[in-house]
Amino acid sequence: MSFLPKTIETLIENFQKLPGIGPKTASRLTFYLLHMPQFELENFGKNIVSLKKSVVYCSVCFNISSTDPCPICSDEARDERTVCVIENPIEILQFEKTGKFKGTYHVLHGAINPLNNIGPDELKIGELLNRIKSGKIKEIILATNPNMEGEATAMYVKREISNLKSQNSRLNSLKITRLAHGLPVGADLEFADEITLGRALEGRREF
């Protein structure tokens, strides 16, 4: 039997639904919020409520943004001929910290994972193929995570692009590369430091 108020119990349960948050961390976060000044707590709540309302998906790369197209796709200084394919929007932050990538991105919003019923149709792969059909892109960098799901996704995307190239001679010069050394197998890009990620970007290889 719990002696906590129902509101606190419910908030702890809600925090536990977030990735990487266990019971102890959920409890600490809840009690931290309980001791926040009321105006800060209200602002915090407003930001959560408006989170999805104030965010749109870029119609070009499917990054999250407050504008469409996003600032990266709108930047004329970026090289739209080079597209880095990533799983999630948060990984763009990591690449931008390196200061070494001047191309654009394409966010798949996940990776192929049959155990979780995530197939190719649930990802933005079709949209990537449509971008490639324009003939403007000269290099696709497959930067999915170096784990089982990421490798499976990279292989699938490579096969689909290869099929496109076989059907359209204009795409023969399109190069497909994969991030190389610097990233340990099984690691997530989200947690890679900018130096490691920068080296992996520089050392990408033909895929």
Image: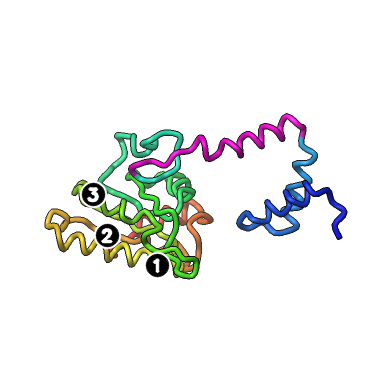
The picture quadrant where one finds residue 145 is: bottom left
Q: Which of the 4 image quarters holds residue 157?
A: bottom left
Residue 57 in the image: state x and y as whole percent. Answer: 42, 42
Counting from the top left corner in percent of width and height, residue 204 is at: 34, 59
Q: Earlier in the sequence, mark 3 or mark 2?
A: 3
Disc 3 from disc 2: Cα separation = 11 Å
Q: Which residue is mark 3?
A: 137
Residue 201 figure quarter: bottom left
Is the residue 52 above or below the residue 85 in the image? above
| Amino acid carrying mark 1 in the image | Glu
Residue in front for this viewpoint, 165 or 196: 165
| Furthest-left residue in this view | 169
Kindly identify which residue carries mark 1.
151
Q: Check contact, mark 2 vs mark 1: CB within 8 A.
A: no
Q: Residues within 10 Å of mark 2 (few under 14, many from 20)?
A: some
Span highlighted in magenta in the image: 37-60
- Look at label 3 and name its amino acid: Ile
Is 122 included in the stretch rendered in magenta?
Answer: no
Q: Residue at x 18, y 49 (%)?
A: 135
Q: Which residue is mark 2?
A: 176
Q: Secondary structure at mark 2?
A: strand
